């Protein structure tokens, strides 16, 4: 029997803890029946906020006791069962298992090209049948008082497993420091240093994120759109009832997910392997493959991407799922893209600002004054310190138009974020600081607020001092790394790095929670440490990691806190699950990395290109940044009389002023026109939304915006019941199907024989080569430097 999903009009329960029949007891299979009337809370009107909230549903005339945000209502159930098992032996076993598998696989392939990233959604999918099989086949006995089989596999167990799998799935940023120290600076410190460095950079973010959960998790306005996709998939797999408005008919969500998942997985083999030109759909470049201007404008690899289309979900969702981000936020991102990359970047390029015509219009690495990739070894002493005279004898460091503009936008986003927070967030921050969880005007907060009164230890709130304790311990780890090892880092610089992360934690978190986009601190931390500690590349990497990753990790943990909030997972299992999984994942990653450097010959060198592919391209980019900002330093790049200052056409440091001024101008205009569309203008989002360019390009933005417009604006407005029922399920299905297919294609067709399968057949047909035989793919510049000559400032003037 299919699940019936319809509008819910059930009377209020007398007590959350006194349900007549446990929802857990009726969670049978992928199809489920309607829940009893006693399980819903009804009609308590949610008051509108007294400040502008771009996601708030202002057109609703009545509201069931539910979230005031339609995105949340469509993905998250508005009831709970506190008796549902969570922290079972099954959940902990599977969670720790995935906390070892995903980080180990991702760390191993992180150093390889082409690389592979196994995301948390894979663990979410695979752990579901694993839990069901455990429930069916594991004997129902107790060992040391712990049940081996607590019964049906519950949705809360599944959430805990997925959180543990995903919290450390990505390669820890600090492992990059260790790899660069080994290869570029010939420093190989012991495992204690490595472990303390990884734990401090990962867990300091956890602690500060936990301390900020009152502002970033409890408020209903902090919707965290990306978590809604995960919630929709959980509820689809476990067949939970959904809240929502309007008539619901057609396919059930679980059947819709199955069809969309199979379609996405099947389709990926076409753009991912058989017809790769559909992924890199640069049709104009195919027509004029050697016309440099056409390729600069229409190319995806080193051009502006006016070709518009891609048929590969990996490309479309590279910057995030367009089905999960609110349309007003997507409109800000695409407005920034059009303004800075489809208008400013071509203007800079074709007027030859910064001598940009001697390079591709979009490129990831730096160039010298002959148009070749910058040879960093020519400006280093044998001890990897900066040689100023060699630098003057060689060349200034040049950046492509898009790369230079990306630095300017990063500078603008830093000041815009602070000013925007002062102007727009001061009132919400004040309100939420003085409001308890139970006082939040949101059913999910009220449900969670009941649990400290429940006589189940797991439901007791996590004390603040637990987070403070984690912060103190991991801060000591950081200090030991600095003092016991020759890293050139200082304790006072550590304080500055953590201060930057803490100052930006709440503003960045609030922006990400409502827009699904994160303001990055990587560039500004590089800039600051470059001025503070010039000539210290290892210190630069450590400062950047503690400043940037502390905030970034805090966002990951806070997003997981919100997931637990939506799914009503007890606070303490979430706390310990994240802590244990982070420690396990970081330790596994270090073990894998040390094994690789001990057993793979010539790792991170060009010799590996024709061996196993472990050339470490990501690590090379990280090392380049350490030399550009830590060795050469920003003084020789952005300061007065240098290349990227005003005298050469456009001063990048002036973007700090632009970033601070733009929110003020819009804020003043909204005071004059309080009901206008200007309320939706968000300059931090405009500046940082295009921060992935390069390596991203229009292929990752234009199709993303088109699909986002169709889903979040057209369908949402005209067919809201259909959108509410299927939108987030479709996003989860496309992500999951593509992720699984990517892994299968990689291990079946690309990894064996070092990618030589089909080398003389499918890999050489027109559909897999046409986009490579273009000036775009070969990154051809508009101007070529004659042999023996150079461009840019005269020798000795930089």
Image (cartoon, rainbow, N blue to C red):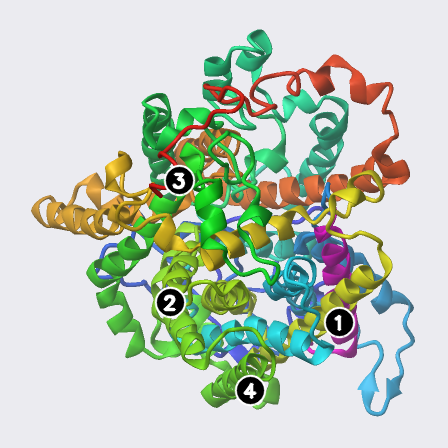
Q: Nearer the viewer, residue 528 or 793?
A: 793
Disc 4 to disc 3, how far (Cα)? 39 Å
Classify the position of the C terminus by image quarter: top left
Q: Nearer the viewer, mark 4 or mark 3?
A: 3
Disc 1 to disc 3, how far (Cα)? 43 Å
Q: Nearer the viewer, mark 4 or mark 1?
A: 4
In the figure, 318 relative to 208: above or below? above
Element under disc 1: helix
Disc 3 to disc 2, how far (Cα)? 22 Å
Image x and y of residue 17, in percent: 55, 80
- Magenta stretch, main secondary structure class: helix
Q: Earlier in the sequence, mark 4 or mark 2?
A: 4
Label 2 environment density (alpha carbons within 10 Å; few <14, some 14–19, many ≥20) = some
Q: Which residue is mark 3?
A: 404
Q: Which residue is mark 1?
A: 96
Label 4 environment density (alpha carbons within 10 Å; few <14, some 14–19, many ≥20) = some
Q: Earlier in the sequence, mark 2 or mark 1?
A: 1
């Amino acid at each position: 029997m299919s699940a019936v999903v319809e509008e819910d009009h059930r009377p209020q329960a007398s007590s959350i803890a006194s349900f007549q029949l446990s929802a857990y007891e009726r969670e049978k299979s992928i199809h489920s029946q309607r829940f009893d009337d006693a399980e819903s809370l009804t009609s308590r009107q949610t008051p509108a906020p007294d400040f502008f909230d771009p996601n708030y549903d202002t057109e609703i005339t009545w509201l069931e006791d539910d979230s005031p945000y339609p995105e949340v209502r469509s993905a998250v159930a508005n009831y709970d069962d506190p008796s549902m098992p969570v922290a079972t032996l099954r959940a902990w076993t599977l969670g720790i298992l995935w906390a070892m598998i995903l980080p180990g696989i991702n760390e191993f392939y992180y150093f390889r090209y082409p690389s592979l990233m196994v995301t948390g959604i894979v663990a979410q999918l695979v752990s579901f049948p694993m839990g069901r099989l455990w429930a069916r086949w594991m004997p129902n006995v107790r060992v040391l008082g712990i049940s081996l089989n607590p019964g049906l596999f519950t949705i809360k167990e599944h959430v805990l497993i997925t959180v543990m799998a995903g919290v450390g799935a990505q390669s820890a940023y600090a492992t990059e420091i260790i790899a660069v120290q080994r290869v570029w600076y010939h420093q190989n410190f012991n495992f204690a240093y490595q472990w303390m460095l990884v734990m401090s950079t990962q867990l300091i973010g956890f602690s500060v994120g936990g301390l900020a959960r009152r502002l970033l998790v409890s408020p209903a306005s902090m919707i965290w759109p990306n978590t809604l996709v995960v919630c929709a998939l959980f509820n689809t797999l476990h067949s939970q009832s959904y809240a929502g408005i309007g008539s619901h008919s057609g396919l059930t969500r679980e059947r819709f997910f199955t069809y969309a998942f199979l379609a996405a997985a099947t389709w990926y083999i076409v753009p991912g392997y058989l017809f790769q030109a559909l992924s890199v759909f640069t049709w104009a470049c195919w027509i004029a493959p050697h016309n440099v201007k056409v390729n600069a404008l229409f190319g995806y690899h080193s051009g502006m991407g006016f070709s518009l289309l891609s048929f590969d979900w990996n490309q479309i969702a590279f910057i995030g799922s367009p089905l999960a981000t609110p349309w007003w936020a997507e409109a800000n991102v695409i407005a920034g893209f059009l303004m800075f990359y489809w208008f400013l970047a071509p203007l800079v390029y074709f007027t030859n600002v910064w001598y940009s015509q001697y390079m591709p219009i979009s490129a990831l690495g730096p160039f010298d004054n002959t148009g070749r990739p910058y040879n960093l070894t020519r400006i280093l002493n044998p001890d990897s310190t900066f040689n100023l005279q060699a630098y003057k004898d060689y060349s200034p460091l040049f950046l492509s138009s898009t790369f230079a503009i990306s630095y300017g936008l990063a500078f603008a986003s830093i000041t815009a974020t602070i000013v925007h927070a002062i102007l727009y967030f001061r009132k919400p921050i004040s309100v939420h600081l003085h409001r308890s969880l139970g006082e939040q005007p949101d059913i999910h907060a009220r449900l969670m607020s009941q649990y400290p009164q429940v006589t189940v230890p797991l439901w007791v709130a996590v004390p603040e001092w637990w987070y403070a304790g984690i912060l103190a311990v991991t801060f000591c780890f950081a200090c030991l790394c600095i003092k016991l090892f020759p890293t050139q880092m200082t304790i006072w610089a550590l304080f500055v790095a953590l201060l930057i992360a803490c100052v930006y934690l709440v503003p960045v978190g609030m922006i990400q929670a409502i827009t699904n986009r994160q303001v990055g601190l990587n560039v500004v931390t590089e800039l600051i440490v470059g001025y503070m500690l010039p000539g210290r590349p290892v210190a630069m990497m450590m400062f950047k990691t503690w400043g940037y990753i502390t905030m970034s990790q805090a966002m990951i943990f806070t997003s997981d806190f919100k997931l637990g909030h939506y799914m009503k997972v007890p606070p303490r299992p979430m706390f310990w699950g994240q802590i244990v999984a982070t420690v396990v994942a970081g330790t596994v990653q270090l073990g894998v990395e040390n094994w690789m450097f001990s057993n793979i010959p010539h790792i991170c060198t060009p010799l590996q290109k024709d061996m196993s592919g472990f050339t470490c391209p990501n690590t090379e980019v990280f090392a380049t940044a350490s030399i550009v900002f830590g060795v050469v330093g920003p003084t020789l790049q952005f300061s007065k009389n240098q290349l990227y200052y005003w005298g050469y056409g456009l001063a990048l440091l002036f973007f700090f002023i632009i970033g601070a001024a733009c929110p003020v101008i819009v804020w003043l205009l909204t005071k004059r026109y309080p009901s206008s569309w200007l309320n939706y203008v968000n300059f931090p989002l405009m500046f940082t939304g295009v921060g992935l360019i390069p390596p991203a390009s229009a292929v990752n933005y234009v199709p993303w915006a088109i699909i986002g417009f169709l889903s979040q604006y057209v369908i949402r407005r005209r067919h809201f019941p259909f959108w509410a029922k299927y939108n987030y399920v479709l996003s989860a299905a496309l992500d999951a199907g593509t992720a699984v297919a990517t892994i299968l294609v990689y291990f079946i067709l690309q990894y064996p024989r070092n990618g030589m399968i089909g080398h003389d057949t499918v890999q050489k047909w027109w559909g897999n080569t046409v986009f490579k035989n273009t000036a775009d793919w070969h990154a051809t510049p508009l101007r070529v430097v004659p042999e023996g000559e150079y461009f840019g400032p005269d020798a000795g003037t930089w």
